Image (cartoon, rainbow, N blue to C red):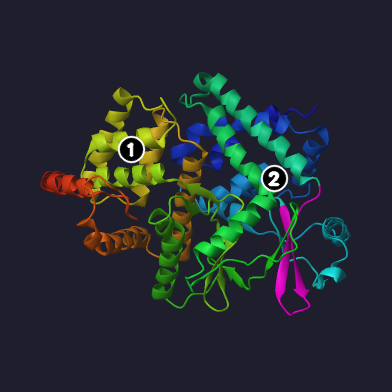
Amino acid sequence: MIDWNILIDEADIASVLPEAYAHYRRPIKRALTVFLAGLSTAQQEAVLADQAMLPATATLFKRVGQLVRSCPALHKLGQTLARDRRLLPALRIQLQRLESLPPSIPLSVIGDTLSRELGPLERLGVSLHLPALAEASVAVVVPFRANGGEDGVFKILKPGIEERLTHELSLLERVGTCLDEECEALGVPRLDYRDTAAGLVERLRHEIRLDIEQCHLAAAGATYANDPRIQIPALFPFCTPRVTAMERVHGVKVTDHGFDGDQERRACAELLVGSLIARPILSVGDAALFHGDPHAGNLLFTQDRRLAILDWSLATTLDEPRRVAFVQLALGAVTLDAARIAEAFVALSEPGSVHLPTVMPMIDAALGRLRQIGLPGLLWLIDLLDSAVQVGVRFDATMLLMRKMLLTLEGIVADLGADRSCIDTVMLGDFFARIAFEWPYRWLSLPHSRAFATRLSNADLAGAMMRMPQAAMRYWLGLAARR
């Protein structure tokens, strides 16, 4: 029996965390101990063997990176954190290597899987072009060429990954239960960790549901069909629940592309924000498709200078009520209207989780900070959502994925070397462009109708205009006090 409580040292954990987060060393150690102890004996021994293969001089950051790579569930979480600017640069570098790894699955295993799933490839008019291109947390990507000359790739689930990931995801729920039971001893707030983990786990199970990803790919292809700047891989007809056959994309990670100057970097950043955030939020449809997992390994800059968006396994839809609430939250921030923000939280959160006596002081504090920095931006919004969680507001898996997507894109924009203010510039520019387009139609609209891409009614706009003088004065006083 491996005693992970002895092997994992709190001081080591603290050393890889920014100083502001060093107090999380105890809950992180407890979470890792529960997770690793729940693995099978063979998997625990494999984790230690992976560590033993590293040289004695390996840094702690490298050892953390290897640990995360050893477990598919941790691998996925590592990809999520890889662009988080709050982490130390040395740790981010190790996690960014998880975005795309050299293939390790034997070619014989790949061949056997394809034969079992698709039958003889010759009947499909397909020939493999080995070696494999890359490996991710749950799948390996292998290129092929169809008889018609089209280049494609097979995305193939790794052998045994369904059972392994399912077990590891159940361990994440066990970690959540442990944190719920020991939150006071570990010094963390009561936040219903198990329920939160369960919601995310349900979404992460889609990683091994290639049939669901295939549906998302088809929907994304239709959504972006009229945008010549975006490439969504087209599906080939021979797909199965364990194999996706799709168009091959020739390009490099957006963060690895050598852009010619600040203008090109900013243009790429604006394209990312416009296509992955502004477009779905301002969609005219009832349900907007969000990517859900936009780490840099899924975002390629192609040879013909397009943005290719890959891996739609964690895509989700943001329904009409949530999008209305999201816009109301932003409108409340612009007008410094705490009550409007609280109402938006009620609509965005799990029923009964918004306790106004606790939430309102948090909102007032956030608006107080806003009066000192100017108009609300993406970083302020992310901080507001995090603060809401800290006071007990529970968001479902869709909102948690949305928050993760916003934070990931913020990190990618920063890693591109672009000014992060371009995120807010794009969002505001697209929003006001939509308002201008909608304006003639508003003359014929009922006061409370929100049948617009902006999800703002005429009553919303009228109320905002009435509050603007007061909000402007409060902004001015806040800026004056700062000086």
* Residue denoted by label 2: 72
Where is 206 relative to 220, above or below? above
* Residue denoted by label 1: 344
Q: Position of residue 296 (x, y in %)?
A: 55, 60
- Residue drawn at 58 percent across, 78 percent down: 303
> For the residue marked with disc 1, what is the amino acid?
Ala
Element under disc 2: helix
Where is 309 relative to 228, above or below? above
> For the residue marked with disc 2, what is the amino acid?
Pro
Query: Does the segment drawn in magenta span residue 33?
Result: no
Quadrant the N terminus occupies = top right
Highlighted magenta segment, given as a residue range = 139-159
For marks 1 and 2, give the one nearer the viewer. Answer: 1
Q: Position of residue 360 (x, y in %)?
A: 28, 29
- Residue drawn at 64 percent across, 50 percent down: 212
Q: Earlier in the sequence, mark 1 or mark 2?
A: 2
Q: Is residue 181 left or right of residue 131?
A: left
